[in-house]
């Protein structure tokens, strides 16, 4: 899937914005749940940063890695 200038995929944007139904559609269409942005952030990290608890839960159930690190070595 294509991303924007910072390599945010549609799943990153949906997770950050709390769009759970869109996230379901994207994952059903085989969007990679651990795709990194330009700075190494995953959709799970974006959901955590924006306090989207339902999206965090969904991504965890979809198999998102909890040990992923961004390019600064930060875990979420």
Image: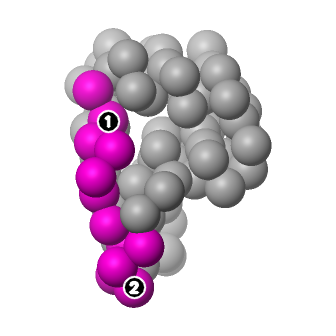
The location of residue 40, given as percent across then percent down, is 35, 71
Q: Quadrant of residue 15?
A: top right
**Residue 55 in sight here:** yes
In the displayed structure image, the side of residue 55 where residue 40 appears, left or right: left
- Residue at the location (61% across, 38% down)? 14
The location of residue 10, given as percent across then percent down, is 50, 44
Identify the element where label 2 is drawn: loop
Q: Nearer the viewer, residue 36 or 44?
A: 44
Q: How many marks?
A: 2
Residue 33 to residue 8: above or below: above
Rendered image: mark on residue 73: none
- For the stretch drawn in magenta, the main secondary structure is loop
Residue 2 to residue 69: above or below: above
**Residue 3 in sight here:** no
- Residue at the location (33% across, 21% down)? 62
Sequence-wise, the earlier of marks 2 and 1 is 1
In the displayed structure image, the side of residue 26 where residue 66 appears, left or right: left
In the displayed structure image, the side of residue 40 where residue 5 appears, left or right: right
The location of residue 8, given as percent across then percent down, is 48, 60
Q: Are marks 2 and 1 in contact (CB under 8 Å)?
A: no
Q: Nearer the viewer, residue 11 or 50?
A: 50
Residue 69 to residue 50: above or below: below
Residues rendered magenta in the picture: 63-74
Rendered image: mark on residue 72: 2
Residue 59 on the magenta span = no
- Residue at the location (42% across, 73% down)? 74
Residue 73 on the magenta span = yes
Identify the element where label 1 is drawn: loop
Residue 42 to residue 10: above or below: below
The residue that label 1 is drawn on is 64
Crowd rating for badge 2 (residues with CA inside 10 Å; few <14, some 14–19, many 20+): few
- Residue at the location (49% across, 20% down)? 58
């Amino acid at each position: 899937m294509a991303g924007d200038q910072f390599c945010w995929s549609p799943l990153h944007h949906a997770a950050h914005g709390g769009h759970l139904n869109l996230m379901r559609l994207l994952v059903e269409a085989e969007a990679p749940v651990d795709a990194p942005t330009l700075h190494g952030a995953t959709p799970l990290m974006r959901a955590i940063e924006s306090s989207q608890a339902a999206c965090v839960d969904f991504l965890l159930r979809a198999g998102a890695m909890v040990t992923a690190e961004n390019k600064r070595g930060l875990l979420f």
